[in-house]
Image (cartoon, helix red, strand yellow):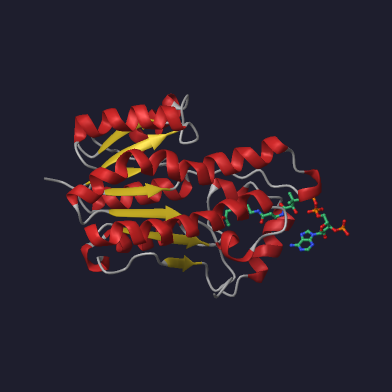
Amino acid sequence: MKKLALITGSKGGIGSAITCKLVSEGYRVIAAYYTGNRDCAEKWFKEQNFTDEQVKLFELDVSDSAQCAERLGALLQEEGTIDVLVNNAGVTRDTVFKKMTAEQWHDVINTNLNSLFNVTHPLFAAMCEKGNCRVVNISSVNGLRGQFGQTNYSAAKAGMIGFSKALAAEGARSGVTVNVVAPGYTGTPMVTAMRPEVLEKITGEIPMKRLATPEEIAAAVSYLVSDAAAYITGETLSVNGGLYMH
Ligand code: CAA
């Protein structure tokens, strides 16, 4: 039986690379995409040449706790336990704090942080019952160091790390590991959407003088979900080209 992985934000820059990597390693992937984006998700599925045996598209609003409980509960009934959960969905609403609206704050906290409860909670008990399962949460260098213009995002990404350490303690006796990958600035639409002069300044601050590739982030996830990483839990693995060393 193939191992089953659920990846949120699966067709985004990093999510797509994680999906491809896990498919190449023989996982079956439930590729969660944001409600209403069906056409876009189908287009991505075709472009990647996935088969129905490899990837199942799954509509999910990770910020909606009731919908997650209902849809993920039904998924468990249909598919059985999820072996690997990658909480990757995330958004930015960058602006200086003085100008930030409550909506910009809540959008980011709901999608990036509250989603950890919404998506993990319906799946976690079954993972513990099965044992030897994996949760990987995609945080950010900006959750570790704080970034100008990202009080909302930095708060959510730092919160993900606390959540992961606490859940790691709860999953440990069942062999369920919970870890964090903290990417630096990565070549994805989220990053390239920044003003060119801002991006240039930030790239200049990265010791390696380049962005990460999505594949470099996916490689870290692939390691943490592997059997080789069974004894690593509650850890944060930075992949940031030396931008922040903690
Ligand atoms: N530190 C200190 N001061 C800074 C600063 C910094 N890092 N960045 C800008 N400032 C200063 C500017 O010099 C400017 O000063 P003056 O008014 O004296 O000229 C002032 O703060 C206002 O800056 P902006 O002109 O940039 O303000 P803005 O309102 O036009 O834009 C912003 C604000 C959208 C937040 C913009 O600064 C920005 O895009 N910053 C980068 C945010 C960022 O890194 N986002 C990451 C997105 S990708 C991602 O999140 C993925 C991941 O995990 C890494």
Q: Quadrant of residue 121?
A: top left
**Residue 49 or residue 171, whichever sits in front:** 171
Q: Quadrant of ligand 1?
A: bottom right
Q: What residue is rendered at 20% in x and 48% in y? A: 129
Left or right of 40 on screen, residue 58: left
**Residue 217 or residue 120, whichever sits in front:** 120
Q: What residue is rendered at 65% in x and 49% in y? A: 152
Image quadrant for the N terminus?
Answer: top left
Q: What residue is rendered at 53% in x and 50% in y? A: 188
From this view, report whether residue 130 is shown above or below residue 162. above
**Residue 10 or residue 146, whichever sits in front:** 146
Left or right of 115 on screen, residue 131: left
Residue 166: x and y in percent read 42, 59
Q: Residue furthest left?
A: 1
Residue 53: x and y in percent read 19, 36
Question: Is residue 87 in view?
Answer: yes
Residue 228: x and y in percent read 23, 68
